[in-house]
Image: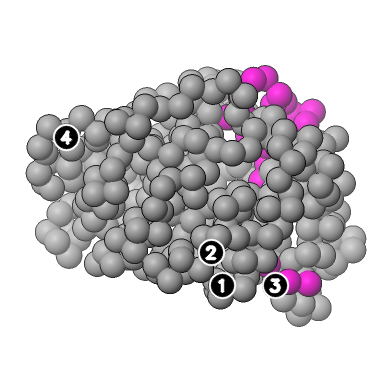
Amino acid sequence: MASSGLPLLTDRYARRIESLRISVTDRCDLRCFYCMPEDVEWLPRKSLLSFEEIERVARVALEGGVRRLRVTGGEPLLRKDLPTLIARLARLPGLEDLALTSNATQLDRLAVPLRQAGLERVNISLDSLDPDKFRKLTNRDMHAQVMGGIDAADAAGFGHISLNCVVIRGQNDDEVVDFARLARERAFDVRFIEFMPLEHGTKWGTDVMVPGKELRERIAEVFPIEPDPDQDPHAPSRDWLFRDGAPGSVGFIDSVTQPFCSTCNRIRLTADGKIRTCLFSLRENDLLGPLRAGADDKELAALLGAAVATKEKKHHITDGLFVKPERTMSQIGG
């Protein structure tokens, strides 16, 4: 039992849920070609969870054994007054880690307020270090803003800055060693993510998905690396350290070729109040309706528990049974 007396959130495969990813908006100021169309229809404002509702769901989840919260989008920094929400979440009992995933376009002005509000870590999505490639990938000329945001986050004193790179063959896979070099030079944690079939359109395929094993081999030819002995077994990334003792690390989220489903301890709360138990879920569990209908904490805890009980054993990307979810990553919350 959790300290509050509420049942621990554990699924039918004995995986204890300890991480909740919270999407605060479906909006984004980039249009990565594999993610979001130009003519996307945003959620109505009234459909978004309020800060009070987000805080309440997070508190009930923490009482059920969740220990880590990650704020996501869309682009979360587009949500007005986000440092206010961060401050509210940072004060919740039982919280051990509070992080944010961002494209960094707004971090130049928000890094310090977020740090002061209690944000501990930032993960920054960056698919290219080259301004021209960045523009082609994102359909926006905002590379300078992103790099400025990274600098601002570094200067604000965040303990760990991670860069997340979705690698696509023929688009940015030739930059892998450059990213590893950046990790060494600035003590960043760079994570390479296998391209997953959650994109807008039909860009995904095994011909453009670069296996993490291939990326590790490319990096090791230039910078010898070795597995991190302190690896978190529940983390989606398998992290490697530089053998010569250089700072920083490289990690590989091999969601397609080496799924980590058996140790997955995450669920997601979408911006419109739905619980998703897997990125590739074909169903969602509504909390927004019950919240606004007056459900008490025990009822919310029961709804969370019921959702967790349906958590999938694994995704089916490579076994021929895969069905693409209706909502893309930007609508789900990474």
Res 156 label: 1
| Dot 3 crowding, Cα within 10 Å, few <14, some 14–19, many 20+ | some
**Residue at 24% from the left image edge and 55% from the top image edge:** 59
Q: Which residue extends farthest right?
A: 221
Quadrant (top left, top right, bottom left, bottom right) of the N terminus: bottom left
For disc 2, the marked residue is 111
Please rate how many residues cluster around mark 1, counting C-alpha atoms within 10 Å: few if below 14, some from 14 to 19, many from 20.
some
Q: Magenta segment range? A: 185-209
Residue 152 visible at all: yes
Image point 39% across, 67% down: which residue? 117
**Mark 2 touching mark 1, by CB under 8 A?**
yes
What residue is rendered at 74% in x and 49% in y? 143
Q: Earlier in the sequence, mark 3 or mark 2?
A: 2
Residue at numbered disc 4: 292
- Please tell me how crowded label 4 is: few (under 14), some (14-19), or many (20+) other residues with Cα within 10 Å: few
- In 3D space, how far apart are the residues under numbered discs 4 and 3 (Cα atoms)? 45 Å
Q: Which badge, 2 or 1, comes first in the chain's sequence?
A: 2
The reply to whether discs 4 and 3 touch (Cβ–Cβ < 8 Å) is no
Task: Please indicate whether residue 162 sits to the left or right of residue 181 in the image.
Answer: left
Give the quadrant of residue 108. bottom right
Q: Which amino acid is tagged 1?
A: Ala
Horizontally, residue 135 falls left or right of residue 256, namely right
| Residue identifier under label 3 | 187
Looking at marks 4 and 1 on the same chain, the residue that comes earlier in the sequence is marked by 1
Give the Cα distance between marks 2 and 1: 6 Å
Residue drawn 87% across the image and 46% down it: 174
- Mark 4 and mark 1: Cα distance apart in space: 37 Å
Q: Position of residue 294 (x, y in %)?
A: 10, 37
Real-space Cα separation, disc 4 to disc 2, in angstroms? 32 Å
Q: Type of residue at label 2? A: Ala
Q: Main secondary structure of the magenta part?
A: loop
